Amino acid sequence: MIIEDDIHACIKVLNEGGLILYPTDTVWGIGCDATNEDAVANIFRLKKREESKSMIILVAKEEDILHYCNDASPLIFDYIKGIQKPLTVIYKKAKNLAKNLINQDGSIAIRIVKDDFCKKLIERFGKPIVSTSSNISGYPPPALFCDIDIEIKKGVDYVVQFRQDDQTPANPSSIISINKDGTIQIIRK
């Protein structure tokens, strides 16, 4: 049971403040406990990424969003339900997350995962998980596990075994935000 073994190992690493390399409903991601500032800082170091660049968090279900932001408009939940492609939404007024994960303007990008592996992992962990593409900053995100830089693979505490052989190319999620007037702004298609 590779999936169960992977979930168990990931939870152990996440609880210890470590980093995981894991498949998401988009590209392979580098993840950590989204409430642990030291773990978030380690992702920035591994990716050689400026801390001013934001990362997203993954949650398992719609109601989880309310635990991590004070600005979840009911309009966005209706919009999310109609979208099939993975969708990341930027919410204002982030809360209950590592301070170095929250954008300078107080916002946070959140995606409700559709991938079964991610959903089970997040539900069992009981907290959101950071998800950032598994590349060194400035390089394109790898579409397949085999394309991930060895520096990234060696720089995490656990590499998920599940789906390493998957040859289906993946793409990053779409990203949107909701303007004050309720209109939707598309940031990445």
Image: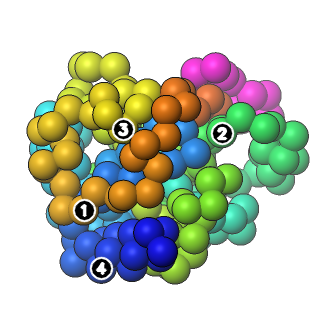
Separation of residues labelled 2 and 3 (CA atoms):
19 Å
Highlighted range, magenta? 179-189
- Disc 3 element: helix
Q: Amino acid at mark 4?
A: Lys
- Label whose residue precedes the other's in the sequence (2 or 3): 2
Write down the residue under mark 3.
145
Q: Amino acid at mark 1?
A: Tyr
Q: Picture coordinates of residue 164 (x, y %)?
A: 40, 46
Write down the residue under mark 1.
158
Q: Nearer the viewer, residue 83 or 64?
A: 83
Separation of residues labelled 2 and 4 (CA atoms):
27 Å
Asked if one can make out residue 66 in the rendered structure from this viewpoint, the answer is: no
Viewer-nearest of discs 1 and 2: 1
What residue appears at the point 55 percent right and 31 percent down from the top-left corner? 168
Q: Amino acid at mark 2?
A: Pro
- Which disc number belongs to residue 86? 2
- Label whose residue precedes the other's in the sequence (1 or 3): 3
Viewer-nearest of discs 2 and 3: 3
Q: Picture coordinates of residue 31 (x, y %)?
A: 34, 55
What residue appears at the point 57 percent right and 71 percent down from the top-left corner? 120
- Which disc number belongs to residue 119? none
- Label whose residue precedes the other's in the sequence (4 or 3): 4
Q: Nearer the viewer, residue 181 or 52?
A: 52
- Which disc number belongs to residue 12? 4
**Is residue 129 toward the left or the right of residue 21 in the image?**
right
Q: Are marks 4 and 3 in contact (CB under 8 Å)?
A: no
Separation of residues labelled 1 and 2 (CA atoms):
24 Å
Magenta stretch contains residue 148:
no
- Disc 1 element: strand
Separation of residues labelled 1 and 3 (CA atoms):
14 Å
